[in-house]
Image: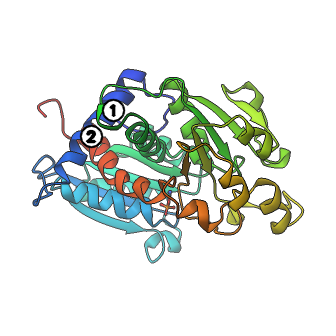
């Protein structure tokens, strides 16, 4: 694997191999000494043009646990604020000797531009670009589902026949898009639920069922309910009448939560707007995988960095 930019580019075999390597990485994280020598001598740059908590710290933890040297770059406080371009920033990283660049950018397509421009030789990992994709989030979500649903026998398996309902601000969600392609590759059936205004134009051509009523979608008793954050920072229009109305119609509140089947999983990529798209009862319940998703993110990102940077000899 040269770069990781979109989940659609992963074959089923590649996706399952990555999830299996993540299982191996997770095993190593149970040891007293968590560090592996795998990427000793390699330099990973975390290049963040947008805010992040989970993705940034878990990529840093993943690279450090593989013994890579890590350079953290945040656009805030850098020469980007003086007008430096992505190209000049990238070539500065090249001069420093980056082997891998993990990039989060507000512009959809920025990681692909970096990977294909010839500005740098490094492997590029998309850590979320605009409203486009967030591949490692989808991989850690799939890893979390596979572990919870298949337990110890998860290795080698996909998510065949698993029903996943993804609810909320689909329009602005790179998590929804990355999950859609990966979950389809792994054999799951995906439904998007949102007010019509938050369903992307053209979504009817995607391999997904579309629904505007959360109550109707939940009546089908899905295996997984993934709630998405309302992305106020990307909304420059009124997409629903009021926060209260959104929460009443599309929020996973206590009463909807009580009707989920016993084995259902409640997922959220974080950060959560408690009281808006999800109430505290489901968020903090035994059905919730929110913190497992964060923990699994380290193992999955270790696997992705390994596949990108370790080379054939590994
Ligand atoms: N899930 C996710 O991408 O969270 P952060 O924005 O905190 O990285």
Please give the label number shown on residue 165.
none
In this view of the protein, can residue 1 be seen by the observer?
no
Q: Residue furthest bottom?
A: 77
Q: Return the residue nearer the eye: 102 or 181.
A: 181
Q: Quadrant of residue 53?
A: bottom left
To which residue does mark 2 refer? 23
Per the image, label 1 sits on a secondary structure element best described as loop
Q: Return the residue nearer the eye: 4 or 151.
A: 151
Residue 300 percent across, percent down from the top left: 33, 45
Q: Is residue 17 above or below residue 248?
A: above
Residue 116 percent across, percent down from the top left: 44, 37
To which residue does mark 1 refer? 154
Residue located 57% across and 47% down the image: 175
C-alpha span from label 2 to label 1: 9 Å
Of the 4 image quadrants, the one containing the C terminus is top left
Per the image, label 2 sits on a secondary structure element best described as helix
* CA neighbours of label 2 inside 10 A, class few (<14), some (14 to 19), many (20+): many
Residue 127 percent across, percent down from the top left: 45, 51
Residue located 25% across and 55% down the image: 63
Residue located 41% across and 36% down the image: 146
Which one is closest to the eye, mark 2 or mark 1?
Answer: 1
């Amino acid at each position: 694997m040269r770069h990781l930019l979109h989940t659609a580019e992963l074959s089923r075999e590649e996706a399952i191999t990555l999830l299996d390597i993540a299982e191996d990485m997770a095993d190593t994280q149970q040891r007293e000494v968590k560090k592996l020598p795998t990427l000793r001598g390699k330099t990973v740059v975390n290049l963040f043009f947008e805010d992040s908590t989970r993705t940034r710290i878990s990529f840093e933890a993943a690279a450090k646990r593989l013994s890579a040297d890590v350079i953290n770059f945040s656009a805030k406080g850098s020469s980007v604020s003086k007008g430096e371009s992505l190209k000049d920033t990238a070539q500065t990283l090249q001069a420093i000797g980056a082997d891998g660049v993990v990039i989060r950018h507000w512009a959809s397509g920025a990681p692909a531009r970096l990977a294909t421009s010839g500005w740098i030789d490094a492997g590029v990992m998309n850590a979320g670009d605009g409203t486009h994709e967030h591949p490692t989030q989808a991989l850690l979500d799939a890893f979390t589902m596979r572990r919870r649903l298949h337990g110890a026998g998860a290795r080698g398996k996909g998510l065949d026949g698993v029903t996943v309902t993804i609810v909320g601000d689909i329009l602005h969600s790179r998590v929804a898009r990355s999950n859609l392609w990966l979950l389809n590759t792994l054999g799951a059936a995906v439904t998007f639920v949102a007010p019509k205004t938050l369903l992307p134009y053209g979504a009817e051509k995607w391999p997904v069922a579309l629904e505007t009523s959360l109550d109707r979608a939940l009546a089908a008793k899905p295996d997984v309910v993934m709630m998405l954050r309302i992305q106020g920072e990307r909304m420059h229009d009124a997409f629903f009448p009021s926060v209260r109305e959104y929460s009443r119609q599309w929020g996973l509140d206590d009463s909807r939560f009580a009707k989920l089947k016993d084995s259902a999983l409640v997922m959220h990529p974080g950060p959560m707007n408690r009281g808006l798209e999800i109430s505290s009862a489901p968020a903090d319940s035994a059905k919730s995988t929110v913190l497992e998703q964060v923990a699994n993110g380290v193992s999955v990102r270790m696997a992705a960095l390994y596949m990108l940077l370790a080379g054939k000899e590994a």
